[in-house]
Image (cartoon, rainbow, N blue to C red):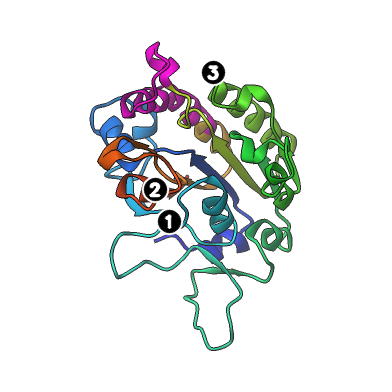
Amino acid sequence: MIDAAEIIRSRTSILFVTLDSLRYDTARTAYDTGLTPHLATLLPDGGWERRQTPGTFTLPAHMAFFSGFLPKLPQPDQPPRLWECRPPAFKTVPPQTFVFDAPNLPAGLAQHGYRSICVGGVTYFSRETPLGSVLPDLFDEDHWSPEFCSPEPDSTRHQVDRAVEIADQYDGKPLYLFVNVSATHVPHGHYLGDSHDSRASQQAALAYADTHLARLITTLTTQHRWLIILCADHGDAYGEDGYHGRGIAHPVVMNVPYAAMIR
């Protein structure tokens, strides 16, 4: 069990990666069939956990994440939360949960000397519209470029290059480094040489991202300890029960992969 309160006391840096739109069954199949060999060596024993997202599309899911609400196990009993906003006086918080006295996690971590950095992917992080500035505004600094977005076939490499560059600039300072991986968000049919998006092409997108995500983790953890959290914000439907896309409370949208580890 991860003691997030100790993580913050020790000023351990945090890497939070969201694999945008990645379904749990896609991630699990890729793991089980060896399509993500580099991540497989880094994930906890057993690979991805199945969890349920607090939001059915990018904006509400990330607002929940940055407020302290990560995906939950699909069962009544839950492990202690990693962190949460200071609750009302009547609520008891487990000692291993980091309690922040701020409206969001980046602001709460700033009170403990952390610098928060966003490397965006999908256009909710692009600042191209007023709505596309809501999530980036939560961070001390944010980075986005068209080459970070899903139409770019090599988007994850560009994102990881930027994330590694930024982390190197702040070597020795505790970071909350967030990366929204766009490769698994539509369109991803190009990973199969097709214009049609499907579960198979999303799996191919994850297989593409595997090498770069592993490079990010291994580079960051070479000299320093990091808390690493990887999950999806939601899944996408590809015709199941007649549904397509996201923003619906269908199991393929609600069930997401999750992993957390200290390295």
Majority secondary structure of magenta residues: helix
User: What segment carries the magenta color?
Assistant: 189-216
Residue 131: in magenta span: no
Quarter holding residue 27 = top left
How far apart marks 2 and 1 lie (CA) works out to 7 Å
Contact (CB < 8 A) between labels 3 and 1?
no
> Which residue is identified by label 1?
71
Name the residue rendered at 59%, 33% in the picture.
121
Contact (CB < 8 A) between labels 2 and 1?
yes
SS for callout 1? loop
Name the residue rendered at 70%, 39% in the picture.
171
Name the residue rendered at 39%, 13% in the picture.
194
Q: Residues within 10 Å of mark 2 (few under 14, many from 20)?
A: many
| Rendered location of residue 191, percent (x, y) | 42, 17
Q: Residues within 10 Å of mark 1 (few under 14, many from 20)?
A: many
Q: Is residue 227 above or below residue 40?
A: below
- Of residues 41 and 61, the one drawn nearer to the viewer in this rendering: 61
Quarter holding residue 40 = top left
- Of residues 20 and 140, the one drawn nearer to the viewer in this rendering: 20
